[in-house]
Amino acid sequence: MPLKTLKKDTAEALTLEWILHIRKYKLALDKNLCVGCQICTLACPKEAIKLEKQPKILGEKAKHAKIDIDLEKCNFCAICDILCPYGAIEVTVNGEHLLSVVEKESFPQLIRDIQVDASKCPVDCVECEEACPLDLIKVTWLAADRKTVENVDSLSEKKGELQVKIDIQEERCPCCRICEFKCPEGVLTVRKNFHGKIDIQPEKCPEGCTDCLDVCPITGALYLSDEDKKVHVNEMFCVYCGACKVVCPVEEALELKRTSVRHTPVSSGAWNKALERLASPVEISKELKAKGSRKVLESVEKRLGWKMV
């Protein structure tokens, strides 16, 4: 048991701490990054994380749900840290970002597959930077002396000598793919880490309601139709985080299912249980069956002493 526990809740952050003899566990939630989605609440094995829906103020946009974490239930396992699409949660041990459940191979890591080929990028193009809804991309240029150039226009006569540099804060990227589609040169290739299905029934939406659109962190995933003045979805950019589902005032108006999660290989009960809460039962059975088939194959190969093709 910890010698001391602390919980601090401010406008900017929620912080929990366990202080032991030789270790200090700390969980920090950055409220500026949190979008009030469902992922951490569903994945938490201790049910320590709760969403608090914010009251709607007449004439104002809806606000995303707030997260609260029960210090008595939290065991700092870092599963919320691993699965947060927006990198809003960080768990540290003695000041180091350590994911013990990953190191022990009892839980996978979320795969953020983002490929960048800056050699294809024109020197004067910043389309990806401007398109990113979360401001996670920064385009700079390297001069012949390898020094960073912040403003390419100041060196217009030397553009041919500059090398493009694209920096992406991958730990915070939910892989919406907007940058990939907005980039005219094919510089970026992004694969989603959460796949699923979202369906909005406009006829069931309350008149004038745009709550889901108000809280959606990905510009373009949801949009207001000029024809019926209702919110519709563009699944090309949806990351299936569930922030919209949380605030929707009508249960049947918005349906969201996660069908798969891109993750590093793992075989554990902890992940299977998390997957049961995150994804649809059909897709869970597919993954578990695939795992079972692999286990059988590996067992046969081990007995025979050679690899089957």
Image (cartoon, rainbow, N blue to C red):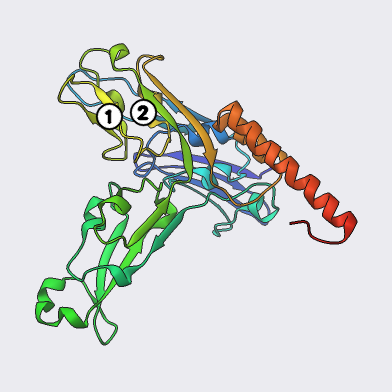
Q: Could you classify mark 1 by the number of other residues whose Cα lies within 10 Å: few (under 14), some (14-19), or many (20 or more)?
A: many
Indicate the position of residue 62 as horizontal and vertical percent values.
27, 25
Q: Amino acid at mark 1?
A: Leu
Q: Earlier in the sequence, mark 2 or mark 1?
A: 1
Any part of residue 23 in sight: yes
Relative to 240, residue 141 above or below? below
- Find residue 286 and report its horizontal and vertical position in percent: 64, 35
In which image quadrant can residue 115 be found? bottom left
Q: Are marks 2 and 1 in contact (CB under 8 Å)?
A: yes
Instruction: Identify which residue, 129 or 30, lies in the foreground.
Output: 129
Q: Residues within 10 Å of mark 2 (few under 14, many from 20)?
A: many
Residue depicted at x 32% and y 55%: 136
Quickly name the residue at label 1.
213
Is 104 left or right of 79, judged from the image as shown? right
Q: Nearer the viewer, residue 226 or 129?
A: 226
Q: Which residue is mark 2?
A: 244
Name the image quarter holding residue 269: top right
Q: Is residue 153 above or below residue 64?
A: below
Above or below for 94 versus 270: below
At horizontal 38% and vertical 39% (from top left) the residue drawn is 10
Q: Pick whichever, 10 or 76, lies toward us.
A: 76
Quarter of the picture containing the N terminus is top right
Residue 252, percent from left and from top: 40, 14
Closest to the observer: 2 or 302? 302
Give the secondary structure at mark 2: helix
Q: Which image quadrant for residue 126? A: bottom left
Amino acid marked by disc 2: Cys
Report how far apart the C-alphas of labels 2 and 1 lie in the structure: 7 Å
